[in-house]
Amino acid sequence: MSALREPALPDGEFSTDPEVVAAHRLDRSGWLPEGTPAGVALARSVADVQAVLRHARATATPVVVRGAGTGLSGGAAATGGSIVLDLTRLNRITEISAEDQLAVAEPGVVTADLDRAAAAAGLRYAPDPASAAISTIGGNIATNAGGLRCAKYGVTRDSVLGLDVVLADGELISTGRRTVKGVAGYDLTSLFVGSEGTLGVIVSAVLKLRPRPAATATVAAYFDEVASAVRAVNDVVAAGLQPAVAELLDAATLAAIEEAEAAAGAGTGTEAAAGGGPVGHKPSAAGAFVLVQTDGPAAVAEAEQVFHLLARHATSVSAADTEAEAERLLAVRRRALPALERRGRVLIEDVAVPRSRLAEAVTEVQAISRRFAVPVFTMAHAADGNLHPIIVAEHGRELDEDVWAAADAIFGMALRLGGTLTGEHGVGVLKRRWLVDELGERNLALQRQLRSVFDPAGILNPGKAV
Ligand SMILES: Cc1cc2nc3c(=O)[nH]c(=O)nc-3n(C[C@H](O)[C@H](O)[C@H](O)COP(=O)(O)OP(=O)(O)OC[C@H]3O[C@@H](n4cnc5c(N)ncnc54)[C@H](O)[C@@H]3O)c2cc1C
């Protein structure tokens, strides 16, 4: 690309260095886009973002906005000829207000860094995608990221009060508010949340902070079968308890964790083999594992109630009395993905169903795995019905027809049970062909019309999301 055809960035730089371009081509979905991007704009200011969009509009060049590239649906994967607009250098936290319980942050701020800054003021940024240490606030907003604490604290949208957005024509607008309430006009803030880089570029966000919980308590249990585990979590919810975290792992995932730990030679007992867990239980024999965390002033009392409710259905339950014990129980969940990744290429699905259908969904996923002879391992955010069936193409196997047939069956199952294709990862490219099944023709057509109002020239992330 000649200098004349490059955007002139007042503060940043534009790179066509093949190494820089290669480092910005993919996200974590495993999707391989065709072609090579034209270059990478490393924005350092709002003026840089505006310069890129004005240039893109004038030259009809597609723009792929990028945070940390940890997305799992192909949203930030760069299509051939596009400009990748990297926002990771726009990474200042410009305000933390303890009085108004809010933060103002640029999009490239790493999620965990924002939470750390909030902690210094006794506050917490509640959304906690498992990628918090590596993903950015801009990416979280653009995907409406979820995480472990959603059942109690909501998803990213519930923490976004206002946004500064550069539109496709380069103009900067502000949406939303800094107040607790505010209903002026249509809720454009919510529209930009989850828009996957298709409606505008988020360059600053006003984010809700909450008081940091005074205490946290952790309980974990093993069950003979998934249905009992789900029943137990439903009992917890029905008792009016609101756990901050309720994670479920199925039998296949437990076995994979145990196998990975054994291969790593970590310890000899079954406790060590599974990376921790309720005492006296052999994880590989269990049908499901559930981890529940309560938080707030009543955390310990609530955890006691949770313990008794889980015990009605479980084969073993244990409560963590110390932070080290809580960490040992949490490690079971944390080790699941690495244990699967060592088996081959993973395709992480993200369907959600009404909580009442969760047991059915997990059981159906297991049947789909058998039907297509494709290994599928399920982890779920049990209190909000969001399942991650993880399809593993074991070493030497491609993402072949059977893998996609299994994915198709999983999406069909989620919709049939009254659920959705994606609870938190977004549509990106990977789920685009199923979107009409969920939205219907008219709804999808309206969404495309809406998109063209914001981006009539179609330069923002073409071929993605809607
Ligand atoms: C190990 C691991 C664990 C994960 N756990 C979770 C989880 O628990 N919950 C969850 O929801 N997700 C999870 N994810 C997925 C991913 O981390 C999230 O989707 C995250 O929000 C993406 O942030 P990012 O900064 O990497 O964005 P990117 O991947 O760079 O971009 C994602 C999308 O947002 C758009 N975008 C990025 N920044 C902007 C901006 N400033 N303005 C407009 N559009 C923008 C991009 O164009 C793209 O469409 C996980 C991923 C990994 C690898």
Image: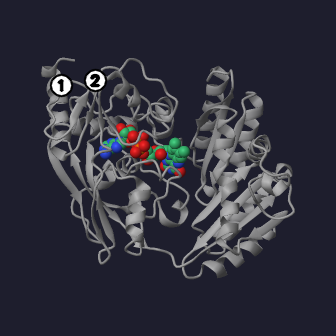
The image quarter containing residue 238 is bottom right
Tag 2: amino acid: Thr
The reply to whether discs 1 and 2 touch (Cβ–Cβ < 8 Å) is yes
To which residue does mark 2 refer?
Answer: 16
Around disc 1, counting alpha carbons within 10 Å, would you say few (fewer than 14), some (14 to 19), or many (20 or more)? Answer: some
Q: Position of residue 87 (x, y in %)?
A: 30, 42
Q: Residue at x 66, y 54 (%)?
A: 333
Q: Residue at x 61, y 45 (%)?
A: 388
Q: Position of residue 199 (x, y in %)?
A: 28, 41
- In the displayed structure, 187 sits above or below 42; it is below
Residue 148 relative to residue 379: left or right: left
Residue 224 in sight in this render: no
The image quarter containing residue 376 is top right
To which residue does mark 1 refer?
Answer: 6
Q: Position of residue 310 (x, y in %)?
A: 76, 68
Tag 1: amino acid: Glu
- In the displayed structure, 262 sits above or below 64; it is below
Ligand 1 placement by image quarter: top left
